[in-house]
Image: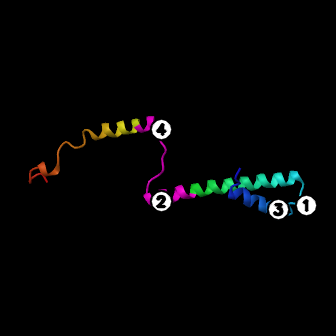
Amino acid sequence: MQISSTEKIIEDLIHATQGEGMSTREQYVLRQALHGLARQARIEQMAEMRANVEKMTGTAAMTFSRHHAKILLKRVACRSNGLQQQFEFDLDDDTV
């Protein structure tokens, strides 16, 4: 089984912080705390990336299920059916 780079770094940190002088339980607690910190850092990085994408595209990242997307598209289609009844260039010069 191959050890990930995060696992390797965590093990190195445990040994660097008096890993040999620590009990097995203390090593376990430190290892779990470091894993939690790594997970939290990944979550924060993803949130920051999402915020940057939203800022760059100018849109809010909304997650819709297929059902909600269909409902939204139907509403937009119903509203837009009657909007283009007459174009501006079809009007007489006197009415413009």
What residue is drawn where x is 89% and y is 58%?
22
What residue is drawn where x is 84% and y is 55%?
27
SS label for mark 1: loop
State the residue position of label 2: 55
SS label for mark 3: helix
> Residue 28: horizontal and vertical position, in percent?
82, 51
Closer to the chain start, of discs 1 and 2, is 1
Mark closer to the observer (3, 2)? 3
Mark 3 belongs to which amino acid?
A: His
3D distance between C-alphas at marks 1 and 2: 49 Å
Tell me if residue 50 is in the magenta stretch. Answer: yes
Query: Where's the C terminus, which quadrant?
Result: bottom left
3D distance between C-alphas at marks 3 and 2: 42 Å
Please identify the dominant SS of the magenta region: helix
State the residue position of label 3: 15
Frontmost residue, 1 versus 10: 1
Check the image and report above or below for 10 versus 61.
Answer: below
State the residue position of label 1: 21
3D distance between C-alphas at marks 4 and 1: 53 Å
3D distance between C-alphas at marks 4 and 2: 23 Å
Closer to the chain start, of discs 4 and 2, is 2
Mark closer to the observer (4, 1)? 1
3D distance between C-alphas at marks 3 and 4: 47 Å
Mark 2 belongs to which amino acid?
A: Lys
Closer to the chain start, of discs 3 and 4, is 3
Closer to the chain start, of discs 4 and 1, is 1
Check the image and report above or below for 79 versus 27.
Answer: above
Mark 1 belongs to which amino acid?
A: Gly
Look at the image and give the residue range highlighted in magenta: 48-69
What residue is drawn where x is 82% and y is 52%?
29
State the residue position of label 4: 65
